[in-house]
């Protein structure tokens, strides 16, 4: 299991859709790796430069309804191909969230106040998040700041991550 | 305690309850297309699980890019074709017999009231128009559907939207659903099912109900559902006539999937459409909705009529009625994509294609192509498209392009003038002999 820790990419907007995460013209690719250069290519977000800002990041922190629109699992794959395997948001679109856990990657929701707090205190700084899955805790660090933020995920979502995704889980069980 | 339609369907399909409100349900059908399925196939092969749960319950179409536009799309078709063949999947719709998935599968009678079905396509919610639970899923869910015939969902909470009032001339199901999305917002029903009900829905054709349910996902919903009634029976009759002695008997069987009077809803919304005007989107989200009146005068470069939202015969009839011998503007590229070969043929026989062609439209084969900027009508940077599709996301029909969603009637009127135009107003001016 990955440790779901690393540098944070802040995306300060709600309703970021899967066409923005990976445009449809790349859906003709049949390998995950091929999606790498195109992540967030078409996003409408002031001051965001995809190639420069994505490099080295492992975690996205964003606002509400992340991953809305098309069902394409290419969206989590494009994240994965870039080394991003955890998304923290105020809320997610249903299919995107399910796709993340089905791929064995967590999509974790935090209350709006906590997300506001993270943007206010950490966005713009080099921020690191360590994930403690035993204690359900994010440890967030930047400069001299260090905070612990608890989270929760359902037992089923946890089981999917432990099983390495839904295909293995389902084929064994049903 | 009473149940909603979705609750009745879930309870009759429950396989497992692994934790909390997660229900693993049995699937009656798994639909596949060439964009999201080949990756699932490749993964299943790589895992040594190249199997299908039931070849008769898997329905396959090539629709997003057809005919193939390059080597990569040709390969997607090839992977799908070979997989269907080696797994004995007989319902496979290839070039010449293919159409937009959410238009062709209902047309073939593959959806029934009370069914559960999934597809690797977010607009799968369309099939809820038949009183089915139909949900778009990602590739991994699709893989498990193909392999085991099951899928996991949260037990459904339902929002009931009671659509009432007298719908005005020139206002269609598309305007109704745009107004509902404008009201709910793009995540107003996330993880929930929307039950569309009320006198307006009861009076709607299956085509109009499909338009309504098709865009439920644009408000975040897992599925849009209409209760099955005689309209549903009539639409399906040619496929079910051997199963039931009479239409009444079929209806009696289908009404098991009607909501109970004491069903408990997450929310009940009254939506009166008496004063509703034709609607159009203005921004990059489907809930950026305004009356056409407020958007008139915006110049467009392309008009696209088609898609799983509005590419059915009724939509083409409405648009042809507005075109009615007129020519489209010199600076507009008009593209019509009938959603299925059956729609294409009907439109041919009814003289609708001639109306479109005489007006200056290009008529393409049935495909999803332009709607998601993959083929057959991609926009250039800075261009504006009036479109009967379902998404106006930034870059959706081509990088840097702007999409205004609207009904086929509004799109046809817009094609004539070259500016966003209310079809009612256009008709009125015409009657008065006024300027176009």
Image (cartoon, coloured by chain):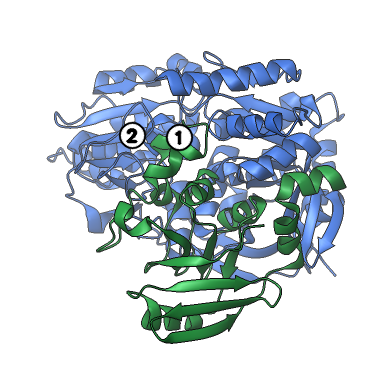
Chain colours: A green, B blue
> Which of the 4 quarters of the picture holds residue B375?
top left
Image quarter (top left, top right, bottom left or bottom right) of the N terminus of chain B: bottom right
Front residue of B292 and B219 = B219
Residue B106 seen = no
Residue at 50% x, 69% y is A89
The picture places residue B6, in percent across and down from the top left corner, at 74, 56
Q: Mark on residue B286?
A: none
Residue at 85% x, 45% y is A172
The picture places residue B293, in percent across and down from the top left corner, at 25, 56
- Please state the chain letter of the residue tagged with numbered disc 2 in the rendered image: B
Q: Is residue B281 left or right of residue A22?
A: left
Q: Are marks 2 and 1 in contact (CB under 8 Å)?
A: yes
Mark 2, other Cα within 10 Å: few <14 / some 14–19 / many ≥20: many
Mark 1, other Cα within 10 Å: few <14 / some 14–19 / many ≥20: many
Q: Is residue B39 left or right of residue B174?
A: right
Q: Is residue B360 left or right of residue B146?
A: left
> Which of the 4 quarters of the picture holds residue B353?
top left
Same-subunit check for callouts 2 and 1 = yes
Front residue of B405 and B38 = B38
The picture places residue B153, in percent across and down from the top left corner, at 72, 56
As drawn, A142 above or below B177: below
As drawn, A60 above or below B278: below
Q: Secondary structure at mark 1?
A: helix
Label 2 – label 1 distance at C-alpha: 9 Å
As drawn, A170 above or below B285: above
Front residue of A79 and B390 = A79
As drawn, B417 above or below A101: above
- Give the labeled residue for mark 1: B307
Q: Residue furthest left?
A: B435
Residue A122 seen = yes
- Give the labeled residue for mark 2: B304
Image quarter (top left, top right, bottom left or bottom right) of the C terminus of chain B: top left
């Amino acid at each position: 299991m990955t440790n779901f820790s690393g540098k944070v990419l802040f995306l300060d907007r709600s309703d970021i859709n899967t066409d923005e995460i990976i445009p449809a013209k790349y859906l003709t690719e049949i390998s995950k790796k091929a999606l790498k250069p195109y992540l967030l290519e078409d996003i409408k977000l002031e001051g965001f430069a995809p190639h420069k800002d994505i490099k080295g990041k492992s975690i996205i922190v964003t606002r509400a309804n992340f991953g809305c629109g098309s069902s394409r699992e290419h969206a989590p794959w494009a994240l994965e191909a870039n080394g991003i395997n955890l998304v923290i948001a105020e809320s997610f679109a249903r299919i995107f969230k399910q796709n993340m856990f089905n791929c064995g990657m967590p999509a974790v929701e935090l209350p709006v106040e906590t997300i506001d707090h993270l943007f206010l205190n950490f966005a713009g700084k080099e921020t690191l998040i360590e994930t403690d899955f035993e204690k359900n805790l994010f440890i967030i660090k930047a400069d001299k700041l260090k905070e612990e933020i608890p989270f929760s995920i359902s037992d089923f979502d946890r089981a999917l991550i432990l099983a390495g995704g839904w295909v293995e889980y389902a084929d064994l069980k049903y | 305690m009473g149940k909603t339609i979705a609750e009745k369907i879930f309870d009759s399909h429950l396989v497992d309850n692994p934790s909390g409100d997660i229900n693993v349900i049995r699937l009656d059908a798994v639909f596949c297309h060439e964009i999201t399925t080949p990756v699932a196939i490749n993964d299943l092969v790589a895992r040594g699980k190249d199997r299908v749960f039931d070849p008769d319950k898997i329905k396959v179409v090539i629709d997003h890019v057809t005919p193939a536009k390059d080597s990569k799309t040709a390969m997607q078709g090839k992977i799908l074709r070979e997989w269907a063949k080696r797994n004995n999947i007989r319902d496979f719709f290839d070039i010449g017999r293919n159409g937009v998935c959410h238009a062709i599968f209902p047309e073939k009678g593959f959806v029934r009231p009370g069914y559960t079905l999934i597809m690797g396509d977010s607009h799968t919610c369309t099939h809820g128009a038949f009183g089915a639970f139909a949900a778009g899923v990602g590739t991994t869910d699709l893989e498990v559907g193909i392999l085991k015939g099951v899928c996991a969902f949260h037990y459904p909470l339902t929002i009931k939207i009671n659509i009432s009032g007298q719908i005005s001339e020139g206002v269609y199901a598309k305007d109704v659903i745009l107004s509902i999305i404008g009201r709910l917002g793009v995540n107003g029903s996330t993880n929930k099912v929307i039950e569309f009900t009320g006198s307006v829905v009861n009076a709607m054709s299956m085509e109009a109900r499909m338009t309504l349910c098709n865009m439920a996902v644009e408000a975040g919903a897992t599925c849009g559902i209409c209760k099955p009634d005689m309209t549903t029976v009539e639409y399906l009759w040619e496929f079910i006539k051997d199963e039931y002695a009479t239409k009444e008997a079929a209806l009696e069987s289908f009404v098991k999937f009607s909501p109970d009077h004491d069903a408990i809803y997450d929310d009940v919304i009254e939506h009166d459409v008496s004063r509703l005007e034709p609607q159009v989107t203005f921004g990059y989200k489907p809930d950026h909705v305004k009356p056409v009146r407020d958007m008139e005068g915006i110049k467009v470069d392309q008009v696209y009529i088609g898609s799983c939202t509005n590419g059915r015969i009724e939509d083409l009839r409405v648009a042809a009625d507005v075109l009615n011998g007129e020519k489209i503007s010199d600076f507009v590229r008009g593209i019509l994509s009938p959603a299925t070969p059956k729609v294409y043929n009907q439109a041919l026989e009814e003289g609708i294609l001639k109306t479109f062609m005489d007006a200056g439209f290009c008529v393409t084969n049935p495909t999803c192509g332009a709607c998601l900027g993959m083929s057959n009508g991609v926009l250039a940077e800075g261009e504006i498209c009036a479109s009967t599709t379902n998404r106006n996301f930034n870059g959706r029909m081509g990088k840097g392009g702007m999409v205004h969603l609207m009904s086929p009637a509004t799109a046809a009127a817009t094609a004539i003038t070259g500016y966003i135009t209310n079809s009612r107003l256009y008709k009125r001016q015409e009657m008065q002999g006024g300027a176009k």
